Amino acid sequence: MNIVQIIPGSGGTFYCGNCLRDSKFVDTLRRQGHQVVKIPMYLPLFADEHDITDIPVFYGAISIYLKQLYPVFRKAPKWFDNFLNSKPLMKFAASMAGSTNAKGLEEMTVSMLLGEDGKQKEELGRMADWIEEHCKPDVIHISNALLLGLVKRIKEKLNVPVVCSLQDEDVWVDVMHENFRKHIWDLMHDNASEVDAFIAVSNYFGDVMKKRMRIPEEKIHAIHLGVDPKDYTYQNSSEKKRAIGFISRMCYENGLDIAVDAFMLLKQKPGFDDVQLVVTGGSTGADTKYIKGIKSCIRKAGLEQQVDFHESFEEEGRHEFFRKVSFISVPVRNGEAFGIYLLESMASGVPVAQPALGAFPEIVNLSQGGEIYSPNTPGQLAKTFEGLLSNRALLKELSRKARKGVEEEFDIDKHTGEMIQVYKAVSEKYV
């Protein structure tokens, strides 16, 4: 099949699970013989994306932000748009809070969902024209429901089915000002009628979005995320030095402070002098003050030498991180729709310790590669750390099960095959 994937980029400044999800599915689709074109929006994708150099970044983050706030920029010449979308400015935008923080972007989110009636209608036309000229897709897959404003124009232009992934849209919308939330959910519901199928990344999140967006049940397909186990080197965690890992964007929402506080509580107990904490995942400008406060707490506790801020989180940097740690914990405050870092960890033989929130229980129950704890507090997490680090036999068994669980339940070849079946089913209506 010929497939177009429209993917918002993160600029590579932090571990972006959604970007990684799309990238891995695209790689597997190609390996299975399908033709796929990745079209980035807002910011470039991960720094290790090497095959999109000839594809423009549509809806450049700086350009659409300025056009949203100041009408004069909507009449700017093309060379000025090209300047705003240049690599140096895109890299700068990726490091700034406004690029990745939902607060303050309510009006732009509404405008994007309005599609041709929004303030970015010219850019929508440019994207639709580019796809028509350069691609002959059988299906178009958009990365999340916040992009549903694209669908009507694209379908009118190309007359092909559109599929939409569902992952953590609620995390974005629910932090916005309350005056906007209902309007945004209503716009997403209205636009959903144009979509041929929705792909939820977990059963849990499919149920969430069925209610929040009022999507007919027959339109939602739950297809778990996956990884290729062959891409990860298995090492049993019981054979390593004792270390706790955190891998995700280093921010309040992902609970880095909960993990650090739990680590500091653990270090107050006898028998854990050797244990280290290894943190990776990057950040944006919005996280700078928060991370500074975290490091100050670590310094005051006298634990600077026992906390490793592992800088590299792309490709080999991630694999090096997994070699360092005995297990990981990302105590996300409100849970997540999935969390692909769990699969990457478990495929490497690294068990997980996650709060009983969101899809975490679903993933851990299927894989048997970790433990679930509740409530999501530093004290309870410290007890979980203690239990895992004090029992080598348990850690050995969880490490073995983690790898096996990914091989049996979260192999990306299997789930990509499920995705193709959805593509074929919706495409039949357009023959």
Image (cartoon, helix red, strand yellow):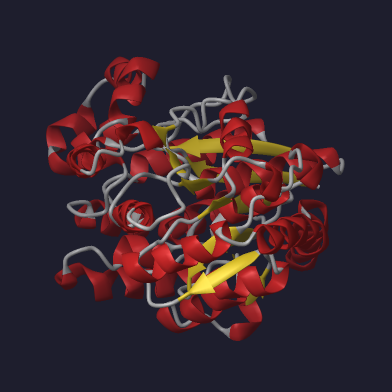
Is residue 174 visible in this depiction of the protein? Answer: yes
Q: Is residue 317 above or below residue 4?
A: above
Q: Position of 5 compared to 404: left or right?
A: left
Q: Position of residue 373 (x, y in %)?
A: 48, 73
Q: Is residue 135 above or below residue 161?
A: above
Q: Position of residue 352 (x, y in %)?
A: 58, 59
Between residues 98 and 428, which one lies in front from this camera angle?
98
Q: Position of residue 236 (x, y in %)?
A: 73, 47
- Count of marks overlaid on the render: 0
Q: Residue at point 48% right, 60% down?
A: 385
Q: Position of residue 91 (x, y in %)?
A: 35, 23
Q: Which residue of the protein is positioned furthest toward the front in this rendering?
A: 270
Between residues 319 and 43, which one lies in front from this camera angle?
319
Q: Residue at point 32% right, 35% down?
A: 61
Q: Is residue 141 above or below residue 249?
A: below
Residue 26 falls in image quadrant:
top right
Between residues 285 and 229, which one lies in front from this camera angle?
229
Q: Residue at point 55% right, 57% down?
A: 389
Q: Position of 176 compared to 205: left or right?
A: left
Is residue 136 visible in this depiction of the protein? Answer: no
Q: Residue at point 56% right, 66% down?
A: 195
Q: Quadrant of the C terminus?
A: bottom right
Q: Which residue of the protein is positioned furthest toward the right in this rendering?
A: 33
Between residues 2 and 299, which one lies in front from this camera angle?
299
